[in-house]
C-alpha cells in the first residue's frame, strides 16, 4: 500500500477571501487510502477541519477521486458517538455527503451519502410547550437573550399603560412568560399587553413546536390571566422570505387607525423583539432573489404618501436593510436585536465551511456540561445543530436559510436605518450575570460598545443589543 502522507505535510487550504480567483487543488495524500494506524493522526479538530475543507473544495471542483478518499477517511474518524470534535466533524461529513448527492458528482459519492444518512440521521423533534420551555432553559444560548431583552423592555416601557410586543423569535414566545411575571411584579395595576407574532415563518426550522400558534396564544393568555395581567394575542400570517411584509403592513395600518381615530390614543409602547429570527430574512448574498420579492415591501403609494414608512426599492436592495427601515417608519419605542455572532453568509463553500466549523464547535463543546450522553434531550439538541450545519453546507439559493451575520454588520444595518444603540443598564447586566451563574463556568459576558456578548471560553457566541429610533 502506498505510504500515507503525515498530516503535517498536508498543505492547508488558504482562506478564499485572500485569493478569490483560485483555490489550489492540493491533494492531501498520494493515491491510495491510509492505514488504520495512520488514521489516528487525524483525530484532532485542526486535522479534521483541514480534511473537511479539502473535501468541500474537491466536491466544488468535481475532483471525484480526492473527494472519495477524504470522505472515506472522515467516515472512519468522525464518529457520531465520539467526543465533541468527532461529533462536530460527523455532522459536517453528513452535510458534505448530502451536498455531493444533490450535485450528483458521481454514483460512488451518492453511495457514501446514503451510508452517512443511515448512520447519522437527523431526527429533529417537535416539542410540546413544556418540553421547549425546559429545553431552552438548559443553556444560556437563548436565556442570555431572553434575560437581556426582558430587562431592556421593562426599562423602556416604564410608565406606558399599553405595551405592544411584536415577537419575532425562533423559540416560539418562550421568553414571554418570564416577561409577564416581571411586569406583574412591578405594577399594582399591570399594563395591557398586546402580543403580535408572525406565523408560517419558520415552522420547519428547529426548534419546532407541536401545536398551532392559536393554541400557544391561548396558553399564554391564560398564563397572563393567572398573574392578573390582561393580554391580547394576535397571529399575523407573514414570512421572513419577503421581509415580513404583511406584518409590517398590518402594523402600519394599525398606526394609521390610531391617527384618524376620534377617541384619544392610549399611551402605548411598541416593542419589536427580534430573537435569532432576522438572519432568516434573505440578504445580499442571495443574488438570485427576484426583484418582485423585493418590491413586496413597497406600500401602496396612496396610503403611504407622506409616511416615513414608504421605502424606495431597487433590484440591489437587501431585504434585511429594507425590513429595518420599515421598522424605523413605525417609530417603535425600542427594538431588541439578539442573534448569533458569526458569519455564515459567504457564497464560497470552503469559506462558509471554515466559518461554520469555527463557530459551531461551541454547542458541541458545551453540551457535556448540561446533558448526559444518551439522553433524549441531548439527541434533540444535537439533531438541531446537525440540521443547521446541513442547511449551511448542503443547501444553496432560497433553501439555504441559515445566513447568520456578525454583530458588527447588524450594527451598521441598524445605524443605516436611523437607529441608535443604547447601553444596557447596570441592573440589566447584573441580571444577565446572575443567570450565567446558574450555568457552567465556561460561560461569560463582555461589553462591546453599547451591547453585551455571551461568550464560551472567551469566544463570542450570541450578542444582545437595544436600539432607539434617532
Image (cartoon, helix red, strand yellow):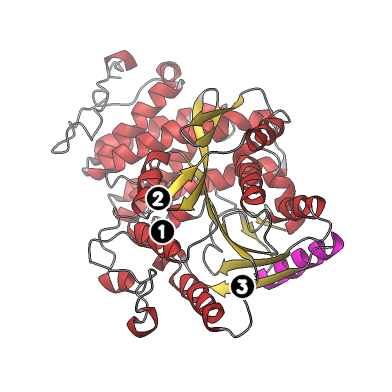
In the rendering, which numbered label is found on residue 235?
3
Determine whether 319 is above or below 456 in the image. Answer: below
- Which residue, given by chain and number where applicable, does mark 2 sit on? 414
Placement of 401 over or under 233, stated as above or below: above
Of helix, strand and loop, which one carries label 2?
A: helix
Q: Magenta stretch containing residue 323, yes or no?
A: no
| Residues packed near mark 1 inside 10 Å, few (<14), some (14 to 19) or many (20 plus) | many
Span shown in magenta = 212-227
> Residue 467 appears at what percent x and percent y?
49, 49
**SS assignment at label 1:** helix
Q: Which mark is first along the chain, 3 or 2?
A: 3
Give how far across and how far down residue 62 sits, in percent. Answer: 22, 44
- Residue nearest the observer in this picture, 247 or 208: 247
Residue at which label 1 appears: 324
Could you tell me if residue 31 is visible in this image?
Answer: yes
Pointers 1 and 2 in contact (C-beta within 8 Å): yes
Residue 322 rendering spot, x and y as whole percentages: 35, 62
Amino acid at each position: 500500500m502506498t505510504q500515507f502522507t503525515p498530516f503535517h505535510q498536508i498543505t492547508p487550504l488558504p482562506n478564499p477571501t485572500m485569493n478569490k480567483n483560485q483555490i489550489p487543488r492540493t491533494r492531501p495524500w498520494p493515491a491510495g487510502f491510509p492505514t488504520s494506524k495512520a488514521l489516528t493522526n487525524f483525530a484532532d479538530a485542526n486535522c479534521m477541519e483541514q480534511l473537511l475543507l479539502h473535501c468541500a473544495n474537491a466536491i466544488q471542483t468535481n475532483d471525484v477521486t480526492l473527494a472519495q478518499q477524504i470522505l472515506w477517511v472522515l467516515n472512519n474518524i468522525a464518529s457520531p458517538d465520539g467526543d465533541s470534535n468527532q461529533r462536530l466533524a460527523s455532522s459536517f461529513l453528513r452535510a458534505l455527503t448530502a451536498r455531493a448527492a444533490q450535485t450528483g458528482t458521481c454514483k460512488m459519492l451518492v453511495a457514501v451519502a446514503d451510508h452517512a444518512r443511515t448512520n447519522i440521521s437527523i431526527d429533529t423533534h417537535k416539542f410540546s410547550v413544556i418540553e421547549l420551555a425546559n429545553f431552552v432553559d438548559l443553556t444560556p444560548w437563548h436565556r442570555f437573550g431572553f434575560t437581556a431583552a426582558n430587562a431592556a423592555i421593562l426599562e423602556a416601557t416604564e410608565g406606558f399603560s399599553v405595551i405592544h410586543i411584536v415577537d419575532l423569535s425562533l423559540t416560539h414566545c418562550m421568553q414571554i412568560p418570564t416577561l409577564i411575571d416581571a411586569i406583574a411584579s412591578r405594577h399594582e395595576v399591570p399594563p395591557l399587553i398586546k402580543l403580535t407574532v408572525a406565523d408560517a415563518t419558520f415552522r420547519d426550522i428547529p426548534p419546532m413546536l407541536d401545536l398551532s400558534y392559536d393554541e400557544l396564544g391561548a396558553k399564554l393568555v391564560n398564563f397572563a390571566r393567572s398573574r392578573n395581567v390582561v393580554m391580547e394575542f394576535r397571529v399575523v400570517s407573514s414570512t421572513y422570505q419577503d421581509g415580513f411584509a404583511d406584518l409590517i403592513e398590518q402594523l402600519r395600518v394599525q398606526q394609521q387607525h390610531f391617527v384618524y381615530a376620534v377617541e384619544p390614543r392610549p399611551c402605548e409602547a411598541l416593542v419589536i423583539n427580534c430573537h435569532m429570527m432576522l438572519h432568516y430574512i434573505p440578504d445580499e448574498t442571495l443574488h438570485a432573489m427576484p426583484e418582485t420579492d423585493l418590491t413586496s415591501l413597497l406600500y401602496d403609494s396612496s396610503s403611504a404618501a407622506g409616511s416615513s414608512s414608504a421605502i424606495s426599492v431597487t433590484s440591489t436592495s437587501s431585504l434585511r436593510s429594507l425590513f429595518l427601515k420599515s421598522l424605523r417608519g413605525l417609530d417603535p419605542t425600542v427594538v431588541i436585536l439578539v442573534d448569533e455572532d458569526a458569519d455564515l453568509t459567504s457564497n464560497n463553500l470552503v469559506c462558509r465551511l471554515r466559518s461554520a466549523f469555527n463557530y459551531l464547535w461551541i454547542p458541541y463543546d458545551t453540551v457535556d456540561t448540561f446533558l448526559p450522553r444518551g439522553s433524549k434531550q441531548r439527541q434533540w439538541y444535537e439533531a438541531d445543530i446537525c440540521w443547521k450545519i446541513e442547511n449551511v453546507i448542503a443547501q444553496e439559493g432560497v433553501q439555504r436559510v441559515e445566513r447568520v451575520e456578525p454583530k458588527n454588520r447588524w450594527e451598521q444595518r441598524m445605524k443605516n436605518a436611523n437607529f441608535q444603540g443604547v447601553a444596557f443598564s447596570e441592573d440589566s447586566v447584573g441580571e444577565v450575570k446572575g443567570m450565567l451563574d446558574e450555568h457552567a463556568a465556561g460561560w461569560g459576558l463582555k461589553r462591546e460598545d453599547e451591547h453585551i456578548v455571551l461568550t464560551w471560553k472567551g469566544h463570542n457566541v450570541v450578542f444582545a443589543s437595544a436600539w432607539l429610533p434617532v
